[in-house]
Amino acid sequence: MNYVNEILQLEHDFTEREIAQKLGIPPSTVHYWLHKRKPTKKSGRRSKTTTEIDESIYNLSSLNPFLPATVIKKQLDIDVSAETIRRRLKQRGLKNRAVATKPFLKPYQRQKRLEFANYYLTWNMDDWETVIFSDEKIFSSVGYGPVRVWRPDGQRFNEKYLHSDKHSSRFTISVWVCIGFINKIHLIARKTLNAEYYVNSILINTLGEIADTSTYIFMHDLSPVHTSKLAQNWLIDNDVNVLWDWPPKGADLNPVENLFGELERRMVNRNPKNDWELWEMVRDTFQEVTSEECYVKKLIESVPRRLKAVADKGGGFSKY
């Protein structure tokens, strides 16, 4: 592409065909560099909202910064897209962020994470492919994923922008998921998960269906339900191999968390009318994602990298 500068130097004195002949290149190449690659001045299009509407959008968000753009659109009954509303809020200096939490690792938690990472770095992919990773998650009818807030810079821990129960005017469902050696999803048919339900409705109906317990290793975190005597006794009595030394605060080591993020991204524009519709969306999206070739495989293959990242940080949180 050394001829580009020469083309640009000759454009005022010669035609495109003449330039092509001088440089020994096709006329189409000359035309491309003289026209298609030149920056063009874009004419600004007319705003879809008036100043009054822009002010209404900002005021409503200011009253309740946890409102998603889709809800603002509905409450104001304005004929613009949710993306337009997001742009207007950004123009006022607001950025859509996850609600602030204050993650903190106690010394013993950091030590346990480091010990776990260092020990399991010796495992190879054949080992990790036998693991069943599991976790639970609450899915919401609006704004899938963590609660988000429209917040200006420098106001992360301002009380106005911290989450509280008053911002929970939406319905939710809880699901249990496992991936890896098997991929399963289960709707938790009660408001809060307890040990009895966990054993009778989840463990028995998933792990209990696998005849040979020596072929897999089960992973669940340190939730009180998981570590209850009832759950632990069932796992022991049924000869289930378990990653008993799973560390505290180990979400970044669990690839199920990334699966949850993918489900949320794919359902972002959906609008269920009730709990059952929401469950069908979550279930169908789970089946869609896990049926894609290599998706789960790539998540499992990321585990050694997660372990190394935690080890490199002395047990601290990794980017995962």
Image (cartoon, grey):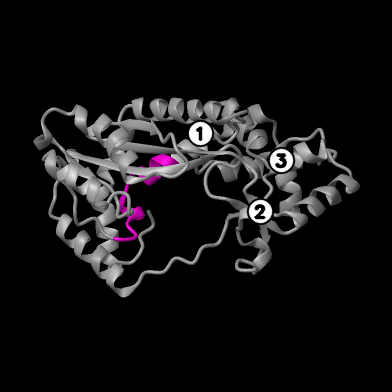
Q: Decide if residue 233 is on the left or right side of residue 67.
A: left
Residue 207 vertical position relative to residue 249 in the rendered view, above or below: above
Residue stretch in magenta: 248-260
- Give the amino acid type for the residue marked by disc 3 in the picture: Val
Horizontal placement of 198 versus 238: left or right?
A: right
Q: 223 or 310: nearer the eye?
A: 223
Q: Determine which of the numbered discs, if any, sits on residue 166 in the image.
A: 2
Majority secondary structure of the magenta segment? helix
Task: Describe the element under mark 3 as helix, strand or loop.
Answer: helix
Residue 221 in view here: yes
Callout 3 crowding tier (Cα within 10 Å): few <14, some 14–19, many ≥20 = some
C-beta proximity under 8 Å, tags 1 and 3: no
Q: What amino acid type should be assigned to the residue bearing mark 2?
A: Lys
At a point 34% along the width and 72% down the height, the residue shown is 106
Whichever of callouts 2 and 3 sits on the residue coming sooner in the sequence is 3
Look at the picture and state if 136 lies above or below 21: below
For badge 1, the amino acid type reads Arg
- For the residue pair 36 and 302, the one nearer the viewer reads as 302
Q: Residue at x 85, y 41 (%)?
A: 49
The dot on residue 71 is 3
Q: Nearer the viewer, residue 275 or 42?
A: 275
- Image quadrant assignment for residue 97: bottom right
> Percent from the top left, x then y, of residue 79?
81, 33
Q: How many marks?
A: 3
Q: CA distance from mark 2 to mark 3?
A: 16 Å
Instruction: Mark 2 and mark 1 in contact? Answer it, CB < 8 Å.
Output: no
User: Which tag is nearer the camera, tag 2 or tag 1?
Assistant: 2
Residue 59 place in picture, x, y as percent: 81, 54
Mark 2, Cα crowd under 10 Å, few <14 / some 14-19 / many 20+, is: few
Mark drawn on residue 266: 1
In the picture, measured across the screen, residue 118 lies left or right of residue 260, that is left
